[in-house]
Image: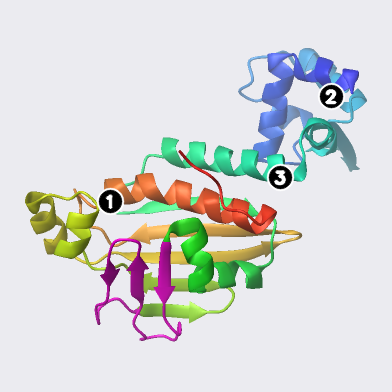
Amino acid sequence: MDEVFKALADASRRRLLDRLNERNGQTLRELCAGLGLARQSVSKHLAVLEAANLVSTKRRGREKLHFLNPVPINAIAERWMTRYDRARAGALADLKRGLEHQPMDTSFVYTTYINTTPERLWTALTEPAFTKRYWGVALISDWQVGSTITWELEKVTIADDAQVVLVSDRPRRLRYAWHTITPEFSAAYGGDAEYLATASAERRSTITFDIEPLDELVKLTVTHDDFEPGSIVLPGISEGWPSIIASLKTMLETGAPLALA
């Protein structure tokens, strides 16, 4: 493990690992491109990383391909972190990336990786008992295309015939229309009359959950779109989703939702 720490202590070697993380299986020539280091220096850095087992190689004809090996770094995490700490740290890292993400004018997109199964994730997205735990809202629906969704929040219930399921492809894709901005909702959660008038005049947005299995993990991509340019609803959406998804991830991986201040 000392060799791993020594290898990671050098900024150039960390940059090489970042390059392999972006695209695995690069040749020495590809890794040298744009790095600002001599070929001989890159070769020496790669030798140190290989000795620390952070990089593995494979021959392809006359070329040597380099691959990132995350096992030693994972071993460091395992040494000082319980599985609950790992899940919470991962969720907080997702939250940080989401808060730093700059959304486009008309949409918000967020991707995370969860140690669960597609079926369990689907259940967590659609069962009101689950959504209430990590989100604070019970979503009531049979989740058939065209069916309505009733939102039962702590302070208000929102029912509207326009709040409908648009796509329901279990356990791969779920898409539905967002809830109505009602006077009761605005009053309960701090919106003033001006916000209510502007927000309720905007077209209804939609939320999509794309679920993709990746070995023992599941890739979840959340896309909230169909906002008008300059939407006043989108900024609040962009701030809210990362914490919700982080709490969902932690609940599925540890059994308890993330406690956020």
Cα distance, mark 3 to mark 1? Answer: 32 Å
Cα distance, mark 2 to mark 1? Answer: 44 Å
Q: Is residue 242 above or below residue 64?
A: below
Cα distance, mark 3 to mark 2? Answer: 30 Å
**Is residue 57 visible in this depiction of the protein?**
yes
- Between 176 and 212, which is closer to the camera in this rendering? 176
**In the rendered view of the protein, which quadrant contains the N terminus?**
top right
Q: How is the structure coloured here?
A: rainbow
Q: Is residue 147 above or below residue 187?
A: below
The residue under label 1 is 234
The residue under label 3 is 84
Residue 246 is left or right of residue 9, and the answer is: left
Kindly identify the amino acid type of the residue bearing the numbered disc 2: Leu
The question of residue 135 being in magenta is answered with: no
- Between 197 and 218, which is closer to the camera in this rendering? 197
Query: Residues in magenta?
Result: 137-164
Kindly identify the amino acid type of the residue bearing the numbered disc 1: Leu
* Residue 49 tag number: 2
Which quadrant of the structure image shows residue 74?
top right
**Is residue 105 visible in this depiction of the protein?**
no
Secondary element type, mark 3: helix
